[in-house]
Amino acid sequence: MSIQRRLIATVVISQLLLAIGLVGGSVYLNRRLLRRAFDNALRERAMSVAALVRYSEETPPRLIFENDLLPPPLEPNHPDLYQVTTLSGAVIAHSSGWARASTFGNLSSNVYQDFTIDGIPYRGLRLQVPVFDREPDVHTNDVLIVRYGSPLDKLNREVVMAGVYTALGTAFLLFLGVAFALWGMRRGLRPLAELADSAALVSPSQWELNASREVLQTTELAPLTDAMRRMLDGLQRAFNQQREFVANAAHELRTPVAILKSTLQLLLQRPRTAEQYRAGLEQALADMDRLENLLHAMLRLARAEQASSGNRQLEVIDLGNSCQSALDTLTPLLRERNVHVELTRDGPAPMRGDPEDLRLVWCNLLENAVRFSPPGGEVNVRISSDSTQGRVEIDDSGPGISNADLPHIFERFYRGDSSRTRDTGGYGLGLAISKALLQAYGGQISAQPAPRNGTRIVVVLPLAQPRSEPSTLAPAATLAE
């Protein structure tokens, strides 16, 4: 599964195919060129044989053949074969081995033919030409039939030698090409190895991807480098959040545990009356209730942040009805704090979700708004929607949140001086839980100063779209508050 081996195999196979094509094409082209030259030479030798036929000085003249002027054969070991006849079939001359050329068929003029004699390949030609010797006193229209054949051994050897030389040259070039390709691939893949070495140095104490300049300048690695950096940034944030969560949780748990331990130690210091033991145990139970509430809030937050681990069926609910249900739950608090809540909506805003999840979100947000509004104050809740999104705005009439605290109020265990204190009984987890639940549904939450005074919380959620199948969504936390 090595990429380098695959590339090498691809290059080698492509070079081999190219070499085979070059050798085959070269042999084919050389054979055609040599065969064409051989055919031209064969025609010239046949014409030269025809030129040796002349008329005798006898009366009446007859055709004779001058053997003394016959050209030497192309192959000394395998002589050329020829036969000169007239149209009537009278033989004027022939070579000594012509009797073996019985396979040289009767072809039409100017046609070449391959044949074999005693295992030796020959190529022959039949020509029909007039007598070249034209005497003034001879008036005749005699036509000669010349059959001439030459061995192909020399031609075949030249074709083979041309193929061998071409193959050797191609093999040498193939070796050079493959060697250069290997060098180029190793050099080209070096940035990838350097990127892997840089990634191996990443650790919980070193999240920076220190890629070399060569890696950064490699076009093909730029998307991978960017993706790795974004991934490492996300992992670093998650790691830091997890580490901060553990540290903050330990800090928050330490106080109720210390109080509970102190109460029990006081009870054991000296003998006490039954009423004193009862009061001490009731105080211990109150501390245990506070510790239990904190653990429930931490578990709810953990499950909300892991909401994308599965799927479940969700029902369509209206944001306005969900907010009204939360207000009904907070009716005792509203009476205690003497705070009036006004809910307005511009129409239905259906979305797919779990009613318990949304009820918890609205309860957290509305409880914060009510608790930090002065007695006799007012909280305004406005619900609006468009074709794709629903928007919920919650304005309180409290002292507001400083600009320095606004970016951090949704962090776990965060308490601003004016917005989150122990006097309210909170742990700094309510807004963090609400944000995690909303993000599980693809929503967003933000805080900003209200137009007049106080703080405005803005929630944006995707609305339900018409579907033919039941919707599934990543589940949010289902643990009871």
Image (spheres, grey):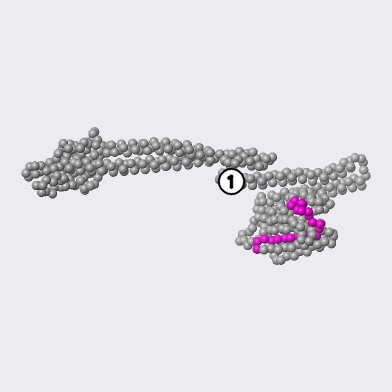
- The magenta stretch is 387-410
| Residue occupying image coordinates x 75% and y 57% | 448
Residue that badge 1 annotates: 222
In the image, taking residue 167 as reference, residue 147 lies left or right, namely left
| Residue occupying image coordinates x 77% and y 59% | 450
State how many labels appear: 1
**Residue 255's image quarter?**
top right
Residue 258 in magenta? no
Residue 406 in magenta? yes
Name the element at disc 1: helix
Query: Front-most of 158 and 336?
Result: 158
**Residue 228 appears anywhere in the view:** yes
Seen as rendered, the residue at the extreme top is 77
Q: Position of residue 465 (x, y in %)?
A: 64, 61
Q: Position of residue 197 (x, y in %)?
A: 61, 38
**Residue 330 appears anywhere in the view:** no
